[in-house]
Amino acid sequence: MSLQARIQDVFNEPACDKNQAKDAKAKKKGCSKPLTPGAAAGGCAFDGAKIALQPITDVAHLIHGPLACEGNSWDNRGAGSSGSDLWRRSFTTDLTELDIVMGQGEKKLFRAVREIVERHAPPAVFVYSTCVTALIGDDIEAVCRRAGERFGLPVVPVNAPGFVGSKNLGNKLAGEALLDHVIGTVEPDDVGPTDVNILGEFNLAGEFWMVKPLLDRLGIRVRACIPGDARYRDVAAAHTARATMMVCSTALINLARKMEERWGIPFFEGSFYGVSDTSDALRSLARLLVARGADPSLIGRTEALIMQEEAIVWRRLAAFRPRLEGKRVLLNTGGVKSWSVVAALQEVGLEVVGTSTKKSTPEDKERIKQLLKDDKHAFDAMAPRDLYALLAAGKADIMLSGGRTQFIALKAKMPWLDINQERHHPYAGYDGMVELVRQIDIALANPVWETVRAPAPWDGDGRPPAMASGPTETGAIALTRRKFAGTTADDMGEC
Ligand code: SF4
């Protein structure tokens, strides 16, 4: 299938609610929106494809293009690996102007695959096209085919050059590459009735490791978690799973739907953020597996585990309630999982004063409306100046967002917590919920806010007191000491 036809196919996704609501003309136009000049933009399609596949940890990810494409996208997410670190190596053909003028692109690509195979012996090499190599017409599919035959391993072309569209389109083209070249190519000899796939889980900050022990206790085996902490052979055998849970609906929905069509694997959309969502996800997995032939006792065992875990997590969360009850949160995420984070925050008595729904489906928006009792707190996209005005006016106590908007909160001298892909703390599962609340508590209680909001110590005579009257304990040090006088680790939310 040509790239153009592939893009049209991906745009016309029947399982996507937004797409279903469009007329034929709008469907043909696709999902890419022209960018607003001057506005910060998301990544390109290449970036999206690489994000969706790079956490497959034992694969060598080779970027065919100029150095900067790889440099801009390398390691910008904190996905965790429990094994190989090959995925974090930076492989690129580093195409120069001279290579392009001399028509050396394809030869350089072939040599790069050979060098990777000789030095690292990976189970597979993924080759990503970029704008430059697509525009000069390098046939990466042909080179990958030839290199695969020559070196005896899968060399997978990922044809998503940056100019074809947005990061989200790149995610989907990555899913297509897996369908075309990877999934279904390995037949495992240990297929079981409780094997599942988890799609769209990136294992950011290692958070899937907070969920996997729950599945292990239920005897549910994760055949493939795509892409977080995945191994090539597991992804290649993903077609043998009995059920699929889709964690991030917009990223790999085409993959989930086509796996259902091709191999009859039913899927559902769920979330591991928040106590009730985690419980619902476990229930749905158990129900789907039983419907497909697993031992019916799985449902009872799942309920018992949920009861036990919820009792523990509520006890742990109760310690935070007196400190957090009534605190107001402004949520400015990509929008995809807003509803599930909203539900999670409400569970500990936090009040959500606003949430973005920019990338939410109509269904997500309806869920948010129900959770917030109305839709006046949901906004599609809020301009930075409006976010700033809201925070500066003290209408929220903390903002939860991605790294790009952190400086709005910091400029307004308000606490901020990173809940997007660059975060350093795991928030999934029951333990993850406790961690999220603990981090909110730490951010709110940080004495730095009192310090930065106080008038500068030298306001008055224009000189710092230390300079005027010698070295005394003033400012932040004194404030910190006062704040924590008599405070224990338990008071600080350790439990
Ligand atoms: S837009 Fe093109 S040139 Fe820029 S990073 Fe993406 S692939 Fe590379």
Image (spheres, helix red, strand yellow):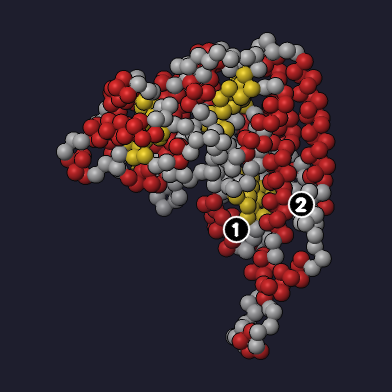
Residue 274 vs 14, above or below: the answer is below
Q: In the image, is 306 to the left or to the right of 476?
A: right
Circle 2: residue type: Glu
Q: Position of residue 209 (x, y in %)?
A: 64, 35
Q: In the image, is 438 to the left or to the right of 8?
A: right
Front one among 144 and 413:
144
Residue 28 sits in quarter = top left
The residue under the point 70% across, 46% down is 435
Q: Circle 2 is placed at which residue position? A: 494
Q: Circle 1 is placed at which residue position? A: 409
Disc on the earlier residue, 2 or 1: 1
**Label 2 crowd bin: few (<14), some (14–19), many (20+), radius 10 Å:** some
Q: Secondary structure at mark 1?
A: helix
Question: Which residue sits furthest top?
Answer: 293
Q: Position of residue 71 (x, y in %)?
A: 38, 46
Q: Position of residue 446 (x, y in %)?
A: 69, 61
Residue 386 vs 33, above or below: the answer is below
| Mark 2 lies within 8 Å of ligand 1 (Cβ measured) | no
| Mark 1 lies within 8 Å of ligand 1 (Cβ measured) | no
Residue 29 appears in view: no
Front one among 103 and 48:
103
Q: In the image, is 263 to the left or to the right of 105?
A: right
